[in-house]
Every structure is written in C-alpha cells, then in structure tokens.
Amino acid sequence: MKFSNVIMVSAAVLVVGIGGLHLFDRLNAGTPTTAPVEPLAEQPAMPSPYESAQVPVEAPPMPDPPQQLVAEIERALVAVDPQQRETAFNSLLPELLREDPGSVVAMVARLAPGEPRDALRDEVTRQWITQDREAAVEWIGTLWEAEKKASAVTAMRTLAARSPAQAIAVADRFGVGRDDGSLEHLVQIWATESPGEAMQWLATQPEGPQTEQLRARIEQARAGQP
C-alpha cells in the first residue's frame, strides 16, 4: 500500500472514531446511567420483646362506698358478737344516713320481719328524726301499720328531750301517745322544766279536745311550781 493511502485510511478511522465518541456523549447526556436513590422512609420503632410483654392489667373496680357500708351493717345485724352491731349503729349508720339515706331505706325494706329488722328500724328512726325530721317522718309514713306505730313512738320519745313541740307534732300526725298517757306525761315534764316554753306553745294551739287534754297537764304542772 502506498504511504499516501495509509495516511488517508488512518484519517478516516480517526474521523469515524471521533464522531462515534460525540454520539455516545450525546446519548449518555439524555439518559442517566444510574437511577436516583430515594431516601429511605423512616420506619416506626418496633417495641422490644420486654415492652410487648407488658400487658396493662386493669385494677378491679372499688366497691361503692355506700354499698360497702350497707354490707358491713347487714353483717353486723346477724353477728354473734353484739359489739359488732353496736359499732355499726354508732359509726357506720350515721355516715350512711348522711351520704345516702335511700340506701338505708332500701336496706330496711330488704330485711325479713324479725329482730334484726326491728332493731335497725328503731335505730334508723332515732338517728334520722334528729338529722332530718321531715325526711324521717315521710319514711315512717311508708311503713306497714304496726311498724309505723312503733317507729312513731320511737320518734316521739327521741324528740321529747330535744323539742317537745316537735315530739307532740309527730305523735299527733301518727295518732300515738294519747291513748296510753305518754304524751300527757311528756307535756307535764316539759311544763315542769320549762313552763314558759310550754305556755307559749299552748297559746299557738287551736281550741279542741286534744289541746284541752294537754292544757290540763300543763296547768297541773304550773300549779305544782313554788
């Protein structure tokens, strides 16, 4: 081959090579060789085996305080030791009457006729008539007849030392105390110890046989005063 031909062939190869390189660069410029790497999404923290094992345990519900008092009083009513009943009447019953008198009413109603029911009914009457006279009187009125009379007498005697006038009102409301002379005796003691109060009360009473019955006792007590 002639030297001039060799030069021409070499020049042609060089031109083709350079053109191919330019074409390769243009192709690579339009298509990235490596796909962009997206950042990894933050994964939620997985609980440790120890944390997974910690299952919350709910505490059992605490008994309702009034119902707890009811249960303790009911147990004391049938206890062999009389001291338990006395403690329940002196400590638990007053608290229950203040917090939830409706529970007391329901408790008495649940008890079967007998000594425990009578004892509780009398104690409720004694305490409630001094705490809330109107509520106690309303409750007494719901009792069956024999219990109503017994509770009315208990209420009258309880009020006699605190307010004879209220004692007379309760006695007359339920029709007790006049047939056995207990109301006249109450009035006579009142007129002896506090004649002024007894006379003031007498002046406010309507005329009638019931007032005259008690007037005689008041005047008898005044006549005995020095």
Image (cartoon, helix red, strand yellow):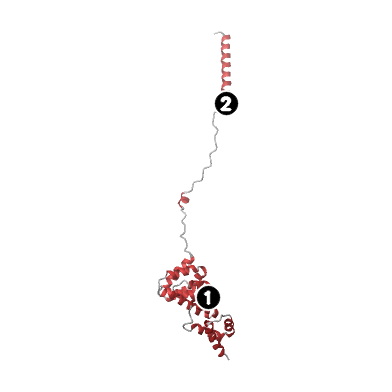
Residue 10 image-quadrant placement: top right
Q: Nearer the viewer, residue 14 or 193?
A: 193
Query: Crowdedness of circle 2 by 10 Å Cα count: few (<14), some, many (20+)?
Result: few
Residue 126, percent from left and from top: 49, 76
Instruction: Tell me the kind of residue under disc 2.
Output: Gly
Where does residue 104 sit, x and y in percent of width and height?
Answer: 47, 69
Relative vertical location of residue 145 with respect to residue 67 in this rendering, above or below: below
Residue 217, given in percent of the width and then of the height, sits at 53, 86
Q: Is residue 115 left or right of residue 161?
A: left
Given residues 178 and 132, the one toward you in this image is 178
> What residue type is disc 1 on?
Thr
- Does residue 183 sit above or below 108 in this rendering? below
In this image, 29 relative to 148: left or right? right
The circle drawn on residue 106 is none
Circle 1: element type: helix
Question: How far is disc 2 from disc 1 in space, using C-alphas?
Answer: 102 Å
Name the foreground residue: 142 vs 39. Answer: 142
Question: Neighbour class for label 1 at 10 Å: few (<14), some, many (≥20)?
Answer: some
Q: Residue furthest bottom?
A: 226
Taking the view exactly as shown, the residue that stands out farthest to the front is 208
Question: Which residue lies under the disc numbered 2?
Answer: 30
The residue pinned by badge 1 equals 130
- Above/below status of 140 relative to 24: below
Residue 81, position as x, y percentages in the image: 41, 75
- First in sequence: mark 2 vs mark 1: 2
> What is the quadrant of the N terminus in the image?
top right
Q: Secondary structure at mark 2?
A: helix
